[in-house]
Amino acid sequence: MKFKDYYEILGVARTATNDEIKKAYRKLAHQYHPDVSKDLAGEEKFKEVGEAYSTLKDAEKRAAYDQLGRHPSGQEFRPPPEWASQHGNQEFSFEDIDLSDLFSSFSSGKRHAQGRNMPMPGQDYELSTQITLEDAYHGKTVDLSFTVPEYDNQGQLKRVPHTFKARIPKGVTNGQKMLLRGKGGKGFHGGRDGDLYLNISFIPHRLFRVMNYDLFIDLPLAPWEAALGATVKVPTFGGAVNLKVPAGTSSGQKLRITKRGMPKQNHEYGDLFAVVQISVPPNPTEQERALLKQLADTSTFNPREHFV
Amino acid sequence: MNIDHSEWMWLDEHHEVSLDELIELSGLSLEELHYLVKSGALIPNNPDEDTWHFNSHCVVSIRTLSRLKHDFELEPNAFALTLVFLERIRTLEFQLRGLGHTKIEGDVE
């Protein structure tokens, strides 16, 4: 088990008062709390800070922590032999757990001793997964894995990997949150098992953008297709469709292709919007150049008329 | 272990959770949830009935509220205000994702 210096994490002296510990925690919580901070590395840092505070704010836990002695942060160590029996009357292997497991079980052991068989709910877990738009359209089976602290048959606390395949149904949206009841950590003494929360986000697609159940695709058109109208093939997840572009279509206009977006939970579909972009030949031939010049000389069209 | 479609609970505006489920999922007490409803920060879909139900998307905000309460030791008076801001952030984030997409009709052959 690796040692963590909780005082160092909170930036306080070993002699700090409860008020000083609380003040240091609040300052760091404002800085790193994942629901408040924009610091992407803040979540891991806050876990450390929260773990340190939950131990040091409790007089009994702090005393037990202090009895572990001082070690350099990250150094492997084992608590003294009498430590476990003195604090919580638990058996520990000390190999597959970390310091936070030790103190949370210490606390549950205390509660167990105080209120025999008091039910304690298992821990909730939150996972994130990214899927492609194609997977969201068709539904997708993903592998989910995480580790939870559990007691083995010998009553020793160990980190146990949980792995399962979960079918993500059609109809999820980007940013969708879902819940699996009872798939988190095991409850203690008859307490309910924890839950598993899954955050689903979409991997950006090379062609499509998504908003709720609607899809958007940039539709490049040649100037003559936009001016004269055309029928063009547009890819969709349900197979390509022929889109009739009306004559006089301008860049930026959106042409709606109904029910070719993402599936909804009620088995209907969103729409696909083709966003027109006028593209010109990058290397026009002599003939193309001559024709464009002829058009420029004869046309009276002024696209900037509204500037004046 | 395989998890089937039917085992998921969707957390969105199309599904509901009961008050009892919300208590279990959020870690907030019945009194705290009653306070949120009384202050107007949390609105049941059926306020006049005895057994309240809520849109399940509120589970996410309420759980965040519960975390903030625990981690920042929030006073009950700060609950309602915090939840209002969390919901406003959620709505703005949703709107942000949709910026720039206006709709014009077209035809498919």
Image: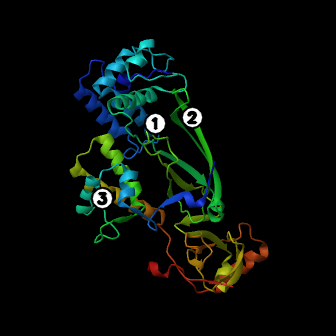
Q: Which residue has dot 2 on it? A: A160
Q: Which residue has dot 3 on it? A: B84
Q: Mark 1: which amino acid? A: Glu
Q: How dense is the environment of label 1, judged by Cα within 10 Å: few (below 14), some, or many (20 and up)?
A: few
Q: Earlier in the sequence, mark 2 or mark 1?
A: 1
The picture quadrant where one finds residue A61 is top left
Query: Under tag 2, what secondary structure?
Result: strand
Q: Which residue has dot 1 on it? A: A44
- Where residue B98 appears, as percent x and y from the top left, is 48, 66
Distance CA(mark 3)–CA(mark 1): 27 Å
Q: How dense is the environment of label 2, judged by Cα within 10 Å: few (below 14), some, or many (20 and up)?
A: some
What is the quadrant of the C terminus of chain A in the image?
Answer: bottom left
Query: Under tag 1, what secondary structure?
Result: helix
Distance CA(mark 3)–CA(mark 2): 39 Å
Question: Dot 2 falls on which chain?
Answer: A
Residue lying at 42% horizontally and 13% vertically, measured from the top left: A82
Q: Nearer the viewer, mark 2 or mark 1?
A: 2
The disc at residue A265 is: none
Question: Dot 1 falls on which chain?
Answer: A
Residue lying at 37% horizontally and 64% vertically, measured from the top left: B54
- Where residue B60 appears, as percent x and y from the top left, is 41, 55
